[in-house]
Amino acid sequence: MDFELTSEQKLIRDTARDLAKREIAPRAAQIDKTHEFPRQIFARLGEMGLLGILVPETWGGAGMDALSYVLAMEEIARACASTAVVMSVQSSLVEAPILAAGTDAQRARYLPDLAAGRKIGCFALSEPEAGSDAKALRTRATRAGASAGDGWILNGTKNFITNAPVADLAIVFASTDPTQRSRGISAFLVPTDAPGLKIGPPDDKLGIRGAPSAQIFLSDCAVAADARLGPEGDGFKIALRALDGGRIGIAAQALGIARAAFEDATNYARERKTFGQAISEHQAIQFKLADMRTEIDAARLLLWRAAVKKDSGQAYATEASMAKLFASEVANRAAKEAVQIFGGYGYLADFPAERHFRDAKITEIYEGTSEIQRLVIASALLKD
């Protein structure tokens, strides 16, 4: 087993690390405080090729592999969790489905702008009564006329849609045949300025405050026939494939948050003194740091395994769920311990530990809760 990165992978990691240190980390606290979408940073990610890592050069991307993507994502998340999830949605949940299921015309229309950061996308699957049970979605798509070329009319409500308040494009999942349950779901590429589409007010969230989310309301929203992404009835398959890749991205985000909590706590422990010595000299603190570092390295190995399996063309859904499950729980444990190491200062917004603590929680919830990941893993192992 070779753990050595290629020169190209090291370059993309180092590029992301340098950008994160110089331009993202100094603004992370302000982004969190103001709930500001990091638009300038997002544009810089596009300029540096970090939004199109997985997009082939033909369609305006860098044409690199999934391991390169998670290397970059970890570095961005270490600096700012909000920026990282915006990047993850753009890459895993918007560009990837268009690349996998779109026509050449759709790819040419959308991918170059998405990869360059000129356009922002969102993934509209969840609904008020269809979160983990995506098959239960109620958004409907009906034909606008008798002819297949007459387009579609969309009606429904989408919930918790990351990037929605700033998005130019939404991938909307709607039922074209409710009698078929999951086989009756189709996907549509819907510009957010389409008549009948309205974005609700931004959600007021615990963490990742710079990554805005909101409801999307569809009221007789008309789209052309060529707006459908993939064959009719393939929407649920498209969503699941996107979420498999998305879980790799969220695992990388969680890993970056865990690393931020660990590194900030380690630096603080070296500086903070009690009883005449740095608290890093106390065994109780050393044990916390040792556990944090060990779990972070273990999470990284699970993440890399999932990415390498994806790159090799093998089935990777179970490995992605394992990586997402473990990395998200590691992030939460690391963030909790960081607050404890910071002590009273960890409870103050003036220090980074409380932000990591708030940011970490969502990684156990979105793109499949930890409970759903355990169901995926258990289902796979019981089939063996």
Image (cartoon, grey):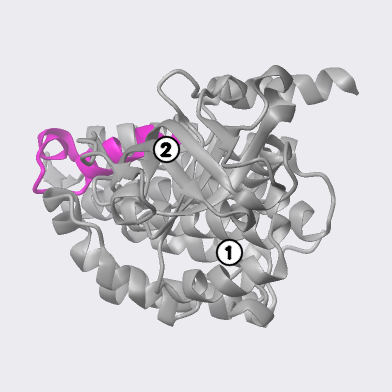
Quadrant showing the N terminus: bottom right
Query: Extreme front residue here?
Result: 146
Residue 249: x, y in percent?
54, 51
Query: Residue 43, relative to residue 73: is it above or below?
Result: below
**Can residue 101 be found in the magenta stretch?**
no
Q: Which residue is drawn at 85% across and 50% down?
A: 314
Label 2 vs 1, first from the N-terminus: 1
User: Quadrant of residue 41 in the image?
Assistant: bottom left
Q: Mark 1 points at which residue?
A: 69
Task: Looking at the picture, tell me which residue is in the foreground, 251 or 98.
Answer: 98
Quadrant showing the C terminus: top right
Q: Is residue 287 left or right of residue 327?
A: left
Q: Distance between the residues labelled 2 and 1?
A: 38 Å
Q: What element carries label 1?
A: helix
User: Which span of residues is magenta-colored?
Assistant: 341-363
In the picture, the disc for residue 220 is 2
Look at label 2 and name its amino acid.
Answer: Asp
Residue 28: x, y in percent?
22, 59
Look at label 1 and name its amino acid.
Answer: Tyr
